[in-house]
Image: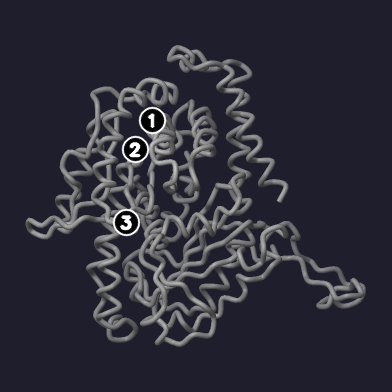
Amino acid sequence: MSVVSLQLGQCGNQIGGELFNLLAEDATNLNPQFISKNVDSKVNQEYEDEVVERFFTCDKIGNSLNARAVMIDMESKAISQTLAQAKKSGKWRYPEGQQFWQKRGSGNNWAHGFLVHGPKSSERVLDMVHKEVEKCDRFGGFLILMSLAGGTGSGVGAYITECLRDEFPHSFILNQVVWPYGTGEVIVQNYNAILTLSHLNRCSDGIIIVENDKLQNICSRLMNLKHISFKDINKVISHKLASVLQPVKLFSQGQDASFYKHSISVKNLLGDLIEQVCPHPEYKLVTLKNIPQMAEQSLAYSTYTWPGLLKHLRQMLIADASMEEGIDWEVKLPVPSNPDGADCHQRPGVLPRVKTRFNKSIANLLVLRGVDVHKCDFTSFSDSRLNVSWVPSNCASTIWCHPRPFNYYEKSASLLSNSQTPAAPLNSVVQKAWNMFASRAYVHQYLKYGMTEDHFVDSFAATEQMIKNYSSL
């Protein structure tokens, strides 16, 4: 089923450009040795066809691919640059007339975006969205790319998301938001973040959070980049997203390689993803971990095994690590006890020297791609200790897979997790925003566009409830 993307603000448009470029590149370029070794031509063709149906329309003139996307920004610069880069790729482009911009931005002011630019632009944006939806033979939902710090991405993004919920009440909406740097990009970013999250939590079905600080570390420590640009960070984000959004099949343990020819593909990607990872309406914050990720020049000299990848990815989940380097292996799950109440793996009188505080999950979605994926033993992710007790064990973990390698990685694994990970950064943002609000710092800049202090208070209450929900798991 097709997905219509909305790219909002400079951040959303730049990420969207990198994402569509990777989707098209991954679908059309596959190492020939992988086809002969693991993927026959039929499976590969089905993969390409599914990518096109999900994210692109095929132009009858020249057979060029047009992204199923609407581009929105209050300034034209980011959109113009993204359009030019797409055209330069030669593989795909954006549809004509599906871009909306004005001459003046939102000035990093959420209220300006939400209360001024949002209402003024919504009618034209919704017309573009309807046009894109009507191109879909089977419509699967919306993917919205935006930031939390800027005025357009956060303010207009929150407003347009609410409009989509009213206009398409039964459609799936998945927001991907970029968390600002902790040291600060703009002085009012904490205000913008809590206002955006409080609104998205009401109208979105799921919110994928990626944090700039963690992305910076990945670029520095795993990609070995010395001078990190936003383009580098956007490439990491697009890799994470595409690793989950590309075609997958349902997988059960113990099947052999022949099952690929007869297994069921996940057609309604957004619907199935949201149903699995966001089973409760009070828990919508999702994080994305993937392994491996490295500089392109290192790929040819690296070898990975499925047991090693899954062992590291599971520990990344437990210890709440954003990358495989520097994982705290002392964080462990509580050891099961025997019926007599004694630790079945512990010597008498010896206390285990491990950290008992671990990252608890509501639900996890494991996506495996690559050579010999049918041989994976993923039972460690079915461990009931990973999840809260009120989620049925058969619903807490789902496995998707595909034998086709992703983005030149012979083997790769991604984990979409609804866990306690967002609680700490959200708590930090709320505390910083409240300290500013208590002294009325910059509040007048929001009030002049028609916002009230009660609006701030309601957003604080909503985000504090989110923190409480996750912290009490």
Q: Pointer 1: residues within 10 angstroms few (<14), some, or many (20+)?
A: many
Q: Is residue 216 left or right of residue 329?
A: left
Q: Is residue 465 above or below residue 313?
A: above
Measured along the vertical axis of the image, is residue 346 above or below residue 175?
below
Residues at discs 2 and 1 in contact (Cβ within 8 Å): yes
Label disc, if present, on residue 8 of the rendered structure: 2
Residue that numbered label 3 is attached to:
138
Residue 353 image-quadrant placement: bottom right
x, y (%) of residue 472?
A: 72, 47
Q: 261 or 6: which is nearer to us?
A: 261
Q: How far is disc 3 from disc 2 in space, using C-alphas?
A: 24 Å
Circle 1 SS class: helix
First of labels 3, 2 by sequence position: 2
Q: What residue lies at 36% left-to-right and 71% top-to-bottom? A: 409
Amino acid type, mark 2? Leu
Residue 190 at x, y = what percent? 53, 31
